[in-house]
Amino acid sequence: MTPALLDHIIDSTAIIYGITERELSSPCRKQHLVHARNMVADIAYTEFIYTYSVIGKRLNRTHGTLIKNLESFAQDCRTNPQLKAIRAMIHQSAKDFLQQQLQTVHLQAGAASAVGEPTIIGDP
């Protein structure tokens, strides 16, 4: 997955929680920040196959911390409908972002082939 997708997940989560990216990666353990971090990690890992290492670097956490937190986050989502709804919104936003990126690549590929240039997917 692209770093842009992880950036989008982080940005979307920060907006929904009303926090900054700096707060998201801070050592603070306030519950809303913990939920936001876990939200990012859960969606990035579960839905988009980012590694714990990549997620951990962005959130300033170790992979062990992520693993432990995601176990409790899964339980929180099962018992808290609001968390589940927020997760669904951020996940949908990430899927929409990917769809938009894919459309941009296809448009660029179509424009390149229309002028006889070789088509390289993902080439800016």
Image (cartoon, grey):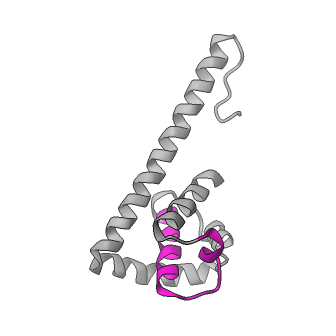
Rendered view: 1 above or below 113: below
The percent position of residue 12, horizontal first and vertical second, equals 51, 60
The percent position of residue 83, horizontal first and vertical second, equals 35, 73
Rendered view: 107 above or below 17: above
Q: What residue is drawn where x is 65% and y is 66%?
A: 54
Residue 115 placement, left or right of 82: right
Residue 112 lies in quadrant: top right
Main SS category, magenta section = helix
Going by the picture, which residue comes out furthest to the top? 115
Q: What residue is drawn where x is 55% and y is 79%?
A: 66
Residue 62 placement, left or right of 66: right
Question: Is residue 121 visible from the viewing direction of this image?
Answer: yes
Q: Is 39 inside the magenta-drawn segment?
A: yes
Q: Nearer the viewer, residue 60 or 121?
A: 60
Q: What residue is drawn where x is 72% and y is 16%?
A: 117
The percent position of residue 72, horizontal first and vertical second, equals 42, 84
Q: Is 54 inside the magenta-drawn segment?
A: no
Question: Is residue 1 visible from the viewing direction of this image?
Answer: no
Figure quadrant of the C terminus = top right
Residue 24 placement, left or right of 77: right
Task: Please give the range of residues in magenta.
Answer: 20-45
Q: What residue is drawn where x is 45% and y is 59%?
A: 47
Rendered view: 97 above or below 117: below
Q: Nearer the viewer, residue 85 or 1?
A: 85
